[in-house]
Image (cartoon, rainbow, N blue to C red):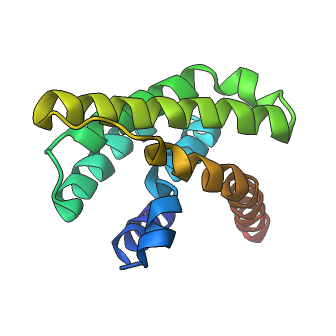
Amino acid sequence: MHLSLLGSLLMMLVPWSAIISLFQPHWIALLIAYWSLNATSNRVIYVAFAYGLLTDILMGSLLGKHGMSLVALSFLVTKSAKQLRMKSIWQMLGMVLVLLFNDILIRAVIDWVSFGYKPVVTDLFPLLTAALVWPWIKYLLDRFQISLRNST
């Protein structure tokens, strides 16, 4: 879990061009959603808060902004994990996109209250790439977990 989350932090820190960074998904939120979906305990909420604070420090944003949004995301995914696991990949993708929209909304409200930032439509572009990336992340991490279980 930690290796994938550290990799997502690295993906967020890589300097991309302006067009790519406009569409770059919130990698940590995608992986927190995945690990919250597959976790057997509630410790992912603590991990989400810790990586959210680390993201705030590395990105230079308001301390606690990502932590709060990731904890809310992890809590909502954990609470609906049983129902999400019973859905097809496309229904799960729809629910994950709704939860990622909630993550964007929480961060936008925090920025609005703190700095008077007015959200624009381009803030929702990462949801498009998240829709493309989510099935692949789920497939690859599921296969990786299966191979780890079989090797032990």
Q: Which x, y percent locates residue 67?
A: 28, 40
Residue at the (42%, 78%) spot, across then down: 16
Q: Is residue 13 above or below residue 103?
A: below
Q: Is residue 67 above or below residue 134?
A: above
Q: Is residue 120 above or below residue 81?
A: below
Q: Which x, y percent locates residue 103?
A: 43, 35
Q: Which x, y percent locates residue 116?
A: 16, 33
Q: Nearer the viewer, residue 149 or 51?
A: 51
Give the number of callouts. Answer: 0
**Image-based side of 100 in relation to 136, left or right:** left
Is residue 41 something one can see in this rendering? no
Q: Quadrant of residue 92?
A: top right
Residue at the (83%, 41%) spot, across then down: 89
Q: Which x, y percent locates residue 109?
A: 28, 28
**Image-based side of 114 in relation to 128, left or right:** left
Q: Quadrant of residue 117?
A: top left
Is residue 150 something one can see in this rendering? yes
Q: Nearer the viewer, residue 47 or 77?
A: 77
Q: Is residue 101 above or below residue 21?
A: above
Q: Residue furthest right?
A: 88
**Image-based side of 143 in relation to 48, left or right:** right
Q: Quadrant of the C terminus?
A: bottom right
Q: Quadrant of residue 87?
A: top right
Residue at the (16%, 27%) spot, across then down: 113
Residue at the (83%, 38%) spot, across then down: 90
**Image-based side of 83 in relation to 99, left or right:** right
